[in-house]
Amino acid sequence: MNWVKIFNTSQEAFDRIAEKQPRLLVVHEKRICLVRQGNELAAVSNNCTHNGESLSKGKLNFANEIVCPWHGYQFDLRTGREYQQRSADLETFPIKIEADGVYIAL
Ligand code: FES
């Protein structure tokens, strides 16, 4: 597993990633959808496994799933699973918050 620093501090991450507003993050040419919920960050592949729409343009629903803006498929941010399993799981990327920065595993 290759850990890549994406923010210098947790505060920088929380300042730049608004809560429950998905953001596109490109790391080593991978397109990732990054979501903050409180003090936690979650990261999944940005391309919807149904038909490729950018999930960072989507919204979170009441269950904190990311909802694709095109056809409304809903993915669990921890497992990447679509709640009705209508399409393949999203790739998920572990994130760790350390004293010297915030890292994502690719
Ligand atoms: S492209 Fe995402 S639900 Fe169809």
Image (cartoon, helix red, strand yellow):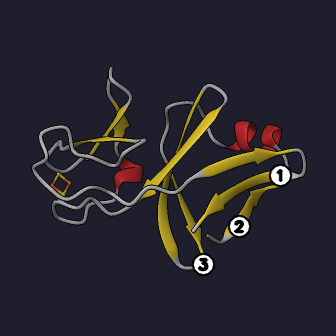
Mark 3 or mark 1, earlier in chain? 3
For label 2, being within 8 Å of ligand 1 is answered: no
Element under disc 3: loop
Residue at x 63% of width, y 41% of height:
17
For label 1, being within 8 Å of ligand 1 is answered: no
Check disc 1 and report the residue beneath it: 101
Element under disc 1: strand
Element under disc 2: strand
Asked if 68 appears above or below 45 in the picture, the reply is above
Asked if 54 appears above or below 65 in the picture, the reply is below
The x and y percentages for residue 84 are 12, 39
The x and y percentages for residue 78 are 42, 41
Asked if 95 appears above or below 18 in the picture, the reply is below
Residue 28 - label: 3
Q: Quadrant of residue 10?
A: top right
Mark 1 or mark 2, earlier in chain? 2
Could you tell me how far apart the alpha carbons at marks 1 and 2 are, in whole angstroms?
A: 10 Å
Q: Quadrant of the C terminus?
A: bottom right
Could you tell me how far apart the alpha carbons at marks 2 and 3 are, in whole angstroms?
A: 9 Å
The x and y percentages for residue 37 are 55, 29
Q: Are marks 2 and 3 in contact (CB under 8 Å)?
A: yes
Residue 4 - label: 2
Q: Amino acid at mark 1?
A: Gly
Could you tell me how far apart the alpha carbons at marks 3 and 1 are, in whole angstroms?
A: 18 Å
Residue at x 44% of width, y 54% of height:
44
